[in-house]
């Protein structure tokens, strides 16, 4: 139960960082990381890749808990 809330809050926090951060801190999100890849693009990539990964981890743990009963 706690893992589900941590995953949901992490994804929501990253989403809020993008939606609030773009108009408020554009120079922060435009920090270059590697070539044309900046901090805003990195946050977006983590949201795109991390959300399904966290969902599969949650479902795996849930299925493992059910099978051990």
Image (spheres, helix red, strand yellow):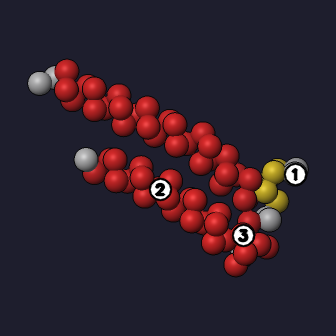
Residue at screen point 26% across, 25% down: 64
* Mark 2 Cα shell of 10 Å, populated few (<14), some (14-19), many (≥20): some
Q: Which residue is under mark 1?
A: 36
Question: Looking at the image, is 63 positioned above or below residue 50?
Answer: above
Check disc 3 and report its element: helix, strand or loop: helix
Position of 1 relative to 62 (above/below) = below
Residue 22: percent from left, percent from top: 72, 69
Q: Which mark is drawn over residue 62? A: none
Q: Position of residue 67 (x, y in %)?
A: 19, 21
Q: For residue 39, which quarter of the picture?
A: bottom right
Along the horizontal axis of the image, is 6 left or right of 38? left
In the image, is 66 to the left or to the right of 22? left
Question: Which residue is the site of mark 3?
Answer: 22
Q: Considering the image in quadrants, where does the C terminus appear? A: top left
Which element type, helix, strand or loop, lies under badge 1? loop
Dots 3, 2 in contact, CB < 8 A: no
Which residue is outermost to the bottom?
24
**Precedes in sequence: disc 3 or disc 2:** 2
Please name the residue that numbered disc 2 is placed on.
10
**Residue at image point 40% right, 34% down:** 57
User: Dot 3: few (<14), some (14–19), or many (≥20) neighbours within 10 Å?
Assistant: some
Front position in the image: 51 or 33: 51
Q: Position of residue 41 (x, y in %)?
A: 74, 53
As measured in the structure, the alpha-carbon distance from the residue carrying label 3 to the one carrying label 2 is 18 Å
Determine the CA span between mark 3 and mark 1: 17 Å
| Residue at horizontal 28 percent and vertical 26 percent from the top | 63
Which is more N-terminal, label 2 or label 1?
Answer: 2
Label 1 packing within 10 angstroms: few (<14), some (14-19), many (20+): few
Which residue is pictured at 42% across the width and 49% down the height? 7
Q: Upstream in the sequence, badge 3 or badge 1?
A: 3
């Amino acid at each position: 139960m706690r893992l589900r809330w941590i995953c949901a809050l992490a994804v929501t926090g990253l989403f809020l960082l993008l939606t609030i951060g773009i108009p408020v801190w554009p120079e922060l999100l435009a920090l270059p990381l590697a070539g044309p890849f900046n901090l805003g693009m990195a946050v977006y990539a983590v949201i795109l890749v991390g959300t399904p990964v966290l969902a599969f981890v949650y479902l795996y743990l849930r299925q493992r808990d059910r099978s051990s009963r």
